[in-house]
Amino acid sequence: MIDTKAVEEHIRGLLIALGDDPDREGLKDTPARVARMYSEVFEGMEYSNEQIARMFSKSFEQKCGGDDFVLVKDIEAFSYCEHHLALMYDMKISVAYIPRDRVLGLSKIARIADMACKRLQLQERIGADIAEIMEMATGSPDIAVMIEANHSCMTARGIKKPSAKTSTVTLRGRFRDDAALQNRLFMQINSR
């Protein structure tokens, strides 16, 4: 559980450390606002991958062919980099899986992606977390997760390369081992 009172105290201390007055009009309520925001944007930290899989595992019986896959692409999300607490933004996540007699409700896939992002994260771990949660929620070992995002730790500070995007691909099961299936997946993702 996120300790909002401790967050408020630390944000107040941070404002002082930055040389500002936390009691001035514009900052008086900032520690409480930040604590509420952190409770929302870091909600995923309160749950394990297994708990998230159980929350969003509503599925429906469906007979599928051997190479049929479900793809939800361009799920918009954001997260915070654990190295700088900097925003990962303009994130687009695509998730695919090969069903095994049951299909997951489509909104559940977006909810899983969203919840995996609501943690202090690395983009690479977001893909791995989504793949793990999807495998638990669907019972399928055949999962693919593609993520493209901007990182404010690269665009707004340090090297300051505003057009730099980071892409990661996480492949499990047949998506990792079957080149023809990979090609179909990437063609589908790249189609608009």
Image (cartoon, helix red, strand yellow):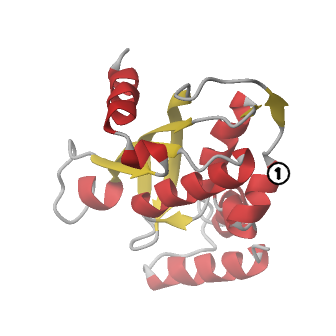
* Along the line of sight, the residue nearer the viewer: 113 or 104: 104
Q: Residue at x 79, y 62 (%)?
A: 51
Name the quadrant containing residue 183.
Answer: top left
- Tell me if 148 is positioned left or right of 42 in this view: left
The answer to whether residue 147 is visible is yes
- Tell me if 168 is positioned left or right of 16 in this view: left
Query: Where residue 69 sits in the image (x, y, percent)?
Result: 55, 28
Image height check: is 133 above or below 178?
below
Q: Residue at x 59, y 50 (%)?
A: 141
Extreme residue toward the front, this view:
66
Query: Where residue 65 sits in the image (x, y, percent)?
Result: 61, 23
The answer to whether residue 115 is visible is no
Name the quadrant containing residue 13.
Answer: bottom right
Query: Where residue 130 sits in the image (x, y, percent)?
Result: 57, 52
Query: Where residue 26 sits in the image (x, y, percent)?
Result: 59, 59
Q: Residue at x 25, y 58 (%)?
A: 154
Q: Quadrant of the C terminus?
A: top left
Extreme residue toward the top, this view:
192
- Tell me if 172 is positioned left or right of 36 in this view: left
Total labels: the figure holds 1
Which residue is the site of mark 1?
55
Q: Quadrant of the N terminus?
A: bottom right
Image height check: is 134 above or below 68?
below
Image height check: is 118 above or below 10?
above
**Mark 1 residue element:** helix
* Along the line of sight, the residue nearer the viewer: 69 or 66: 66
What kind of residue is marked 1?
Met
